[in-house]
Amino acid sequence: MKQDRQKPNKFSIIDHEADIGLEIYGKSMEELFANAVDGLFSLIVEAKDITPEKGKRFDTNANGETLIAFLNELLYMWETEGFIPVDFSLKIDEKKLTGTVIGGIFDPGKHTAKQEVKAVTYHGFSITEGESGFVAKIILDV
């Protein structure tokens, strides 16, 4: 699922005291996770023309906190390698998250770093399911 970070109705930014919040929308859990990545990375880096160079395989137990762990893993990859995710192939069920995230590496000649995000927190975290899909709320420590 190649992502378009400019597409509306994927996520919205929420005002939160000293931190930043995101409200993320998805018709499926897979779309919710992909849109959460887009929301997070739209705050971190202005990146166009990313050449996919690297993939990260995920195969982990799923629970209510899987989204936070998934985003923090990608944030760690950004901080240590300059990894910018651009394409997703995820499968999420009640017990497992499996799939691959493909991305490129930050190039200061082509990309612009924006906001430092230290962590995706558990504070205020929720995922709810409604008629039109899923909504997640997360707070980012900046």
Image: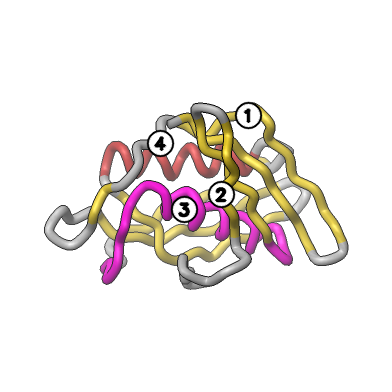
User: Taking 31 as reference, is 55 left or right?
Assistant: left
Which residue was labeled with disc 3? Answer: 57
Query: Which of the two labelled residues, at mark 4 and mark 2, occupies the earlier sequence position?
Result: 2
Q: In this view, does 32 lie above or below 69?
A: below
Q: Which of 40 and 73 is in front in this view?
A: 40
Q: What residue type is labelled 3?
A: Arg
Q: What stretch is highlighted in magenta?
A: 26-51
CA gap, disc 1 and disc 2: 17 Å
Q: What residue type is labelled 2?
A: Ile
Which residue was labeled with disc 4? Answer: 117
Tell me if label 4 and label 2 are in contact, CB under 8 Å.
no
Q: Is residue 60 visible?
A: no
Which image quadrant for residue 27? bottom right
- Please, what secondary structure does the residue beneath circle 2 have? strand
Q: Is residue 2 above or below residue 18?
A: below
Q: Is residue 21 visible?
A: yes
Q: Which of 77 and 133 is in front in this view?
A: 133
Magenta stretch: helix, strand or loop mostly: helix
The nearer-to-camera label among 1 and 3 is: 1
- Please, what secondary structure does the residue beneath circle 4 have? loop
Residue at position x 57%, y 69% from top? 8
Q: Which amino acid does label 4 sit on?
A: Val
Q: Residue 122 carries which label?
A: 1
Residue 134 place in picture, x, y as percent = 75, 56
